Image (cartoon, rainbow, N blue to C red):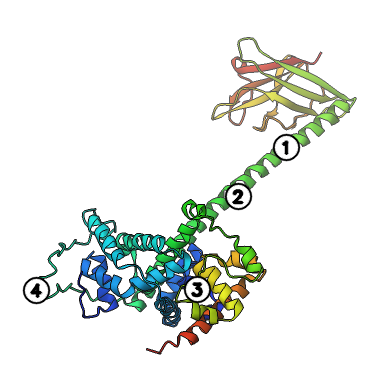
Amino acid sequence: MDISCIISSGDLELYVMGLLPEEESRKMEQLIVLFPELKAEADRISETLEALAMQTTQAPRPSAKQKIFEQLSTLKDEPYGGENQAPVLPLQMDETDDAPAKVIPLKKKKTNYLLAAMVAGLLLSIATILFLVAENRNKQNDIAALEQRIQSVNQNNAALQEQQLAYEELLRFVQDENIRTIMLQHVPGKPQASAKVFWNQQSKEVFVLDVSLPQAPAGKQYQLWAIVDGKPVSAGLLADQKNRTQKMTAFEQADAFAITLENKGGSASPTLEEMYVMGKTS
Amino acid sequence: MSTRSIPYTEEALVEGLKLHDEQSYSYFYDNYGKAIFGVIFQVVPNQEAAEDILQEVFVKIWKNIGSYDPSKGRLFTWVLNIARNQAIDYTRSKEFNKGGKTISLSDNVNSGERPVQSNYHDAGLKKIVESLPEEARKLLELSYFLGYTHEEIAEMLKLPLGTVKTRLRTAIIELRKRLDINKK
């Protein structure tokens, strides 16, 4: 801190005159406590202005003092306004009393400036650290929240891409003249469900898509069957992802396709009570 | 009302004032009352009004001495600032302005004339303040006796803020020379 800079700025003069804005004044107050050089200069300025005041030739009339002290004595009864409740000395009205003037005990309050500065510095440091810790915690929370958002956006994005792929695939199938679409309708007594089977008449490839079936319970899995000559033949297990078109076992011919719920891993023959959807090919 | 003849140290005086000890107030009045009055009179050149303000100042000292902190400034300076503020407040009050003593300060300043309020013809501060160079005198009057902020003064005198402050400092250094304050 360049003290001479503060001294030459003229701010100390304003401070002494009580003309500095409140906040600046408080800052200067602290600086003065910390730097004896500033205190000495402030005192020099004070002395000058005090000496100027002492030059006056004007004086209040003698009656003024009595008026003032009459008013002050009425204030004696009022509770002391300051924070530190100072004991009020009894009024000594009898001025002819020759008793020696009451000696007011003086507490020798030696302000230890260095200690005050150290304590102030320490408090400031602690406050700063607490502030920074809180700031840091806020920042970390912010970062965590942002990371979470990025993750969810990424997930969303992946899901959208998936959907996009599914639509593109679907479009390809729909536009492909060789593809036959077989709608699998829900079997009476089963909850609302449906699925589509795409059957390429040229390559004989079978795809399943647009599967809308109840969530398979744990340990269970849906299985596609082709009914060939009245007998169900497994066309493979359905993956969990419902949106994607899934390639199943190819069939030369089939009378119908059906989906049943089987134990995980599939069965050799379908559990007919657990058939959910079915659709004939012709 | 008698006064203790033994001079108080500033520390003892502050303690006494804080304790609302009447003798301390009496001592303070006898030693500083006139100077305080002089500063008030500088701002409000009217005997009766200045005496009323002096009374208000003593009431303020009585009520606020508890918040006075010697480490932040000297007692007399603290009191002088109370007195100046009280006097300046008075000049800005209706009561004062009714008397037609309102002045447009900027007019006076720009024309280089002395503000009407600063009645140096009667005040003892006249000689010293008047002996200052024109600009120093003006700055001291505007800030110290009329209570204008340095921002306001900068605007009135069309000077940069920093210049106002450093010139005010120069004015006080000049004042110090003229007052011939002996080094303690």
- On residue B90, the disc is none
- Residue A252 vertical position relative to residue A34 in the rendered view, above or below: above
Under mark 2, the amino acid is Glu
Chain letter of disc 3?
Answer: B
Kindly identify which residue carries mark 1: A160
Q: Are marks 3 and 1 in contact (CB under 8 Å)?
A: no
Tell me the tag on residue A147.
2
Tag 4 secondary structure: loop
User: How far apart are the two marked residues, 4 and 3, measured between alpha carbons?
Assistant: 46 Å
Measuring from the top left, give residue B163's x and y in whole percent.
62, 75
- Measured Cα–Cα span from mark 1 to mark 2: 20 Å
Q: For marks 3 and 1, give the CA distance.
A: 91 Å
Q: Confirm whether circles 3 and 2 share one chain.
A: no
According to the picture, the residue beneath numbered tag 4 turns out to be A99
For the C terminus of chain A, give its image quadrant: top right
Q: Residue at x 18, y 72 (%)?
A: A104
Of tags 1 and 2, which is closer to the observer? Answer: 2
What is the chain identity of the residue bearing mark 2?
A
> What residue did someone put label 3 on?
B121
Graded by Cα atoms within 10 Å as few (under 14), some (14 to 19) or many (20 or more), the crowding at tag 1 reads: few
Three-letter amino acid code at disc 3? Answer: His
